[in-house]
Image (cartoon, rainbow, N blue to C red):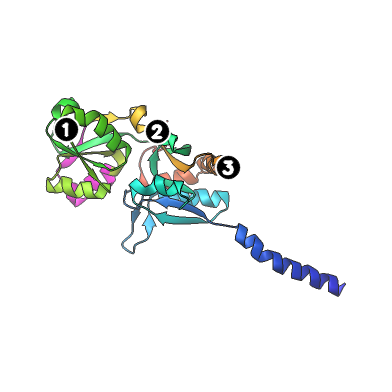
Amino acid sequence: MKKIALLGALTMALLAPLAQADDKPLRIGIEAAYPPFAMKTPEGAITGFDYDIGNALCEEMKVKCQWIEQEFDGLIPALKVRKFDAVLSSLSITEDRLKSVDFTDKYYHTPAKLAMKAGTVINDPLVDLKGKKVGVQRSSIYDRFATEQFTPAGIEVVRYSSQNEIFLDLAAGRVDATLADVVNIDDGFLKTDAGKGFALVGPDYNDVKYFGNGAGIAVRKGDKATAEKFNAAIAAIRANGKYQAIQDKYFQFNVYGE
C-alpha cells in the first residue's frame, strides 16, 4: 500500500509541471495613452476602464491577464503575428477592421466629436473647417473618416501616434481641432488645465460605416474559441454587477450604450 501511495504521489509530482505549462496567461495588447480608457499612473502602472474591464473578464474566465503595451497603429499587426492573443484597447468594430481580425461583442459604445476653442460655432463641418488643421490618431477610425470626408473638402488632416500628442498641439495652437471619442476628449483634455478654453463643438459622429457598432475585443481571424469565451465573460460581468461597478468608477452615464 505504501508503494502504491508513493507511486501515486510521484505521478502527481511529475504531472504538476505539465499542468502548469498548459495554464498559459492570456496576452492582451493595449495602448496605455488613452484616458480614461487606458493610461499610466505616476508610478508607471497601467490603469483605466479598458484595463479594469480586461482584468474583470480574465477573472471571470479564470485565466491570468498578461498586458503588453503597444502603440495604437501597431496593435492589429502585432495581434496578427501572435505577439498577443487579443487586443483590448478601445478598438471600434468596423467593417474595415473585420477584414483582418475578428471581434467579440461590444463592451462599450460612445460617439466621436470635435474639440476646438470654446465659442467656435460649427454648423457644417465640411464648410466651417475648410482650410483648418484637424488632428487625428494615426490608423484610428477618426483617421479613416477624416481622410475620406475632411480631406476632399479642403480640410488639412494631421496624423499623430497618440491622442495625447494631439491634445498638446491643440492647446499650443498647432492644430485647430481634433476628432476623437467624446469621453476621451472630455476626460483626457477638457477636464485638465491644458483644456481650459476649449469645448466640444459640432455634431456627434456615429456613422456605422466609419465608427462601427461600439468597441470590441479583437482576436485573430478564425479564433472563435477566444471570442466566445470573452463574450460569455462580458455577459457575465454585465449580469453580476462587476461591469456596473467599473463603469461607475469612471463615468456618470451608461457607457455601454443601447
Tell me which amino acid carries mark 1: Ile
Q: Is residue 197 magenta?
A: yes
The quadrant of the picture occupied by the C terminus is top left
Real-space CA distance between mark 2 and mark 3, rounded to the nearest whole angstrom? 21 Å
Residue at x-position 13% and y-position 48% = 172
Q: Quadrant of residue 199?
A: top left
Residue 63: image x %, image y %?
56, 54
Left or right of 30 in this view: 24? right
Q: In the picture shown, does residue 152 fall above or below 161?
A: above
Residue at the image point whose x is 42% and y is 49% from the top = 78
Would you say residue 249 is visible in this rendering?
A: no
Whole-percent x and y of residue 220?
A: 49, 43
Name the disc covering residue 155, or none.
1
Q: Which residues are magenta?
A: 185-202
Q: Which mark is residue 225?
A: 3
- Which residue shows up at 58% across the image and 42% down it? 225
**In which quadrant will I find the N terminus?**
bottom right
Instruction: Point out which mark residue 72 bears.
Output: none
**Quarter occupied by residue 111:** top left
